[in-house]
Amino acid sequence: MNEPNAIKIIGSVADFETFPAQVKVDNQPHYIVEAPRKGEEPQRYNLISAICPHAGGMVRPHLNELICPLHYWCFDLATGESTNIPGEQLDCAPLAIQDGQFVIKV
Ligand code: FES
């Protein structure tokens, strides 16, 4: 069982200059993306799986989407929600920044 405030360090913020940024978490491909924000609130980030929920293809960024080249399911680049298959979604978790590191709660 995880501790209540357990976190996993994803990487140093300084190592990522542009987004989406490819990163491996538990040896699985993911993207760090800029999350939607309102007005003047600080930039937030999400960690999105690069593995398509349809049949395991590897999604790739194209314009404002992540697109799976196997059967062309498309996903919003900021949230992972499918833009052409209702109800489908890439795994997505909010990232926090602690001591200059991107972290997720585990
Ligand atoms: S495996 Fe991604 S659309 Fe089919």
Image (tube, rainbow, N blue to C red):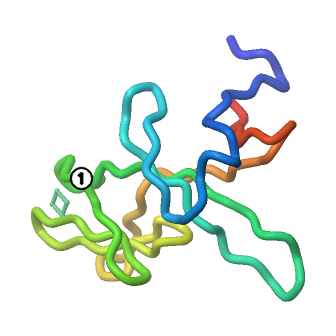
Q: Quadrant location of residue 100?
A: top right
Left/right placement of residue 48 relative to residue 88 reads right
Choose between 61 and 78: the one closer to the eye.
61
Residue, x 86% and y 37% (percent of image)?
Answer: 99
Asked if ligand 1 lies within 8 A of label 1, the reply is no
Quarter of the image holding residue 46? bottom right
Q: Is residue 99 above or below residue 2?
A: below
Badge 1 is on which residue?
58
Mark 1 is surrounded, within 10 Å at the Cα level, by few (under 14), some (14 to 19) or many (20 or more) other residues, namely some
Q: Is residue 5 placed above or below 42 in the rendered structure?
A: above
Residue 6 spot, x, y in % from top left = 77, 23
Q: Position of residue 82 (x, y in %)?
A: 38, 73
Secondary structure of the residue carrying tag 1 is loop
Total tally of numbered discs in the picture:
1
In this view, the residue farthest toward the left is 70
| Image point (74%, 64%), residue name | 44
Identify residue type, mark 1: Met
Q: Is residue 42 shown left or right of residue 26? A: right
Where residue 66 sits in the image (x, y, percent)? Answer: 35, 69
